[in-house]
Image (cartoon, helix red, strand yellow):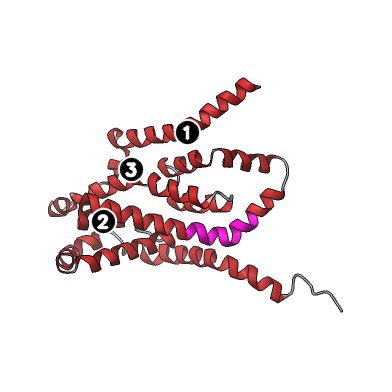
Amino acid sequence: MTQSDPTTPSRRRPALLRHAPLAIILIAAVVGTVTLRDHITFDTLRAHRETLLAFRDSHFAALAAAFIATYVVIVAFSLPGAAVASVTGGFLFGLVLGTTFNVSAASLGAIMIFLAARWGLGATLAARIETSEGRMKRLKQRLHDNEISVLFLMRLVPAVPFFVANLLPALVGVRFRNFVLTTVLGIIPGAIVFTWIGVGLGEVFDRGDTPDLSLLWEPQIIGPILGLAALAALPMLIKAIRGKKDI
C-alpha cells in the first residue's frame, strides 16, 4: 500500500479553509477602502440626520440593533468609517448608551478578526514560534509574561492602528481571555471621547461645520489616555528593574 502524499489536495483543503476567514477579511478591507471611503462620512450623516433621528424616535430598538450590527461589520472587515460610526453612536444614543453600543460593537468586531486570524495563520505562526529556538522564542516568552500590559498598551497608545491591535495578538498566540479583557476595557477611554463628540454633533451641523476629530490630540484629552498607558506599562518596568537587581 502506497503512503499518501501530504501535499495532495485532500490534505491542502483543510489548511485553505482555515485561512479563508482571514483572507475574506483582508479582501473585504481592500474593496471597502476603495468603494466606501467616500460614502461613510460626516457629510452622509449630515444629509440623513433628520431621517435617522425620526427613525430612532419611532423604532429605537431596531435602530440600535442595526447600528451595532453595522459597526461590528465595519470593525470586523476593517472597513473605513469606524470614527464616523463612533461619533454617530453619541449623536443618536447619547453619551451612556452611545458609549455602551460603541464599545460592544467594536469589541465584537475585534474578536471576530482575532478568531479569524488565530484559526488560520495565527495557529501556524504560533506553532512555529513555539518550536523555534533563540530570539523569537524568548520574545514570545517575554510577551506572555507581560501579556496584559502589552495588550493594554496597544489599545491605549493612539499610534497603534486598531486593525493591528486586533490582528497582531492573534498571530503571536496571546490568550483569548486576555485579548477580550484588554480590548473591552482598553477601548473605553477612546470610545468615550468619540461618543462625547457625537453628543454635540447636532450643534456642529447647525453651524455648517464638520466635527473636529483633532480634539483627540488636545492635552486635556490625550494626557489622561497616555497616563493610563503609562500605568499599563508600569508592571513591565517593575519586572525589568527586579530582573536587573537579580542579575
Reply above or below: 142 against 198. above
Residue 185, how many percent across, how many down? Answer: 38, 45
SS at mark 1?
helix
Q: Earlier in the sequence, mark 3 or mark 2?
A: 2
Please identify the quadrant where the N terminus is shown.
Answer: bottom right
Could you tell me which secondary element the residue under label 2 belongs to?
helix
Q: Quadrant of residue 39?
A: bottom left
Would residue 226 be found to the left or right of residue 210 on screen?
Answer: right
Disc 3 residue crowd, few under 14, some 14–19, many 20+, Cα 10 Å: some
The residue where tag 2 is placed is: 89
Q: Is residue 123 magenta?
A: yes
Q: Which residue is at a point 32% across and 48% down the rendered structure image?
A: 191
x and y percent of residue 215 in the render? Answer: 27, 41
Q: CA distance from mark 3 to mark 1?
A: 17 Å
Magenta residue span: 113-125
Instruction: Please report whichever mark, 3 or 1, sits nearer to the chain's N-terminal start.
Output: 3
Give the residue at mark 3: 189
Q: Around disc 1, counting alpha carbons within 10 Å, would you say few (fewer than 14), some (14 to 19), or many (20 or more)? A: some
- Identify the amino acid type marked 2: Gly
Amino acid under label 1?
A: Ala
Residue 101 locus on image (x, y percent): 30, 56
Q: Tell which circle, 1 or 2, labels the residue nearer the N-terminal end.
A: 2
How far apart are the alpha carbons under marks 3 and 2? 15 Å
